[in-house]
Amino acid sequence: MSLVRLNIKGISYSQTQNGAYALILSEEDGERKLPIVIGAFEAQSIAIALEKEIKPPRPLTHDLFKNFADRYQIMVKQVIIHKLVDGVFYSSIISERDGLEEIIDARTSDAIALALRFNAPIFTYKGILDKAGIYLKTQPKEEKISDEEEAVIEKLITGEDQESKKKTSKNYSKHTLKELNKMLDEAVANEDYEKAASIRDEISKREK
């Protein structure tokens, strides 16, 4: 399957969902946008990397990784968003040291924060863009996120959050502690943290 190069369009903050941000990627030779919901810390790290003039007094986590990699001559060559499962994007960091290439699994927000610091290109597969990409009627040369894009992205963020609430509103009282702990591990592994929080609350009730 062919790879499509993506550029960072910007970061949008949800006006209705507290602490929710969307990272907007746009295909280099097309009009589709790929919105990815990210956390506040990752949004801040990406924003700082985009604004070259901002220098935090102490290195952020992604800056520390960059410094560590530079010291040991590790280079990030590219980032590939390679999978989309239940609204969660999965990414790989392609790195190289002493001529040996390694593929490292990473959260998409972390992978992109590092790609910016290494000036590494970001790619996804055409199938993922076909599935999750959206068309927005904006001017090709427009650099900032427009009001129209903000409105569409807000709906996407709100829709994802509502979908998560539907998943996490499930009654876990009928499950045993053993089943709940297993479900908690699965939720964390799938990065479904809202579901994990609900399961953890049910476990806490039992342990009181």
Image: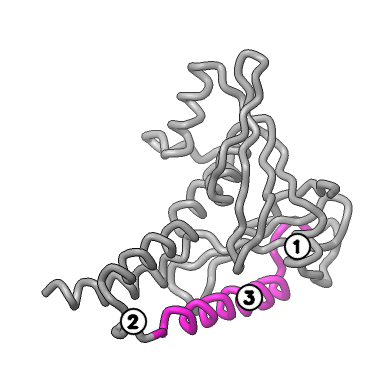
Q: Do the residues bearing badges 1 and 3 touch, measured as CB atoms within 8 Å?
A: no
Instruction: Please tell me whether mark 2 or mark 3 is closer to you in this view.
Output: 2
Q: Secondary structure at mark 3?
A: helix
Q: Residues within 10 Å of mark 1 (few under 14, many from 20)?
A: many
Q: Nearer the viewer, residue 141 or 1?
A: 1
- Of label 2 and label 3, which has the lower sequence position? 3
Would you say 41 lies left or right of 173 here?
right
Q: In the image, what residue type sits under mark 1? A: Lys
Q: Which residues are magenta?
A: 142-170
State yes or no: residue 169 in magenta.
yes
Identified at 46% across, 66% down, the residue is 192
Q: Residue at x 46, y 24 (%)?
A: 68
Between the C-alphas of marks 1 and 2, the distance is: 37 Å
Residue 131 placement, left or right of 79: right
Q: Is residue 19 visible?
A: yes
Lower sequence index among marks 1 and 3: 1
Residue 172 is tagged as 2
Residue 33 numbered tag? 1
Estimate the x, y position of residue 148 in percent, counting from the top left: 72, 75
Question: Residue 173: image x %, image y %?
Answer: 29, 84
Horizontal placement of 83 versus 69: left or right? right
Could you say where residue 48 lies in the image, as x and y percent from the top left?
Answer: 52, 45
User: Between disc 1 and disc 2, whose residue precedes?
Assistant: 1
Vertical relation: 115 (above or below) 154 = above
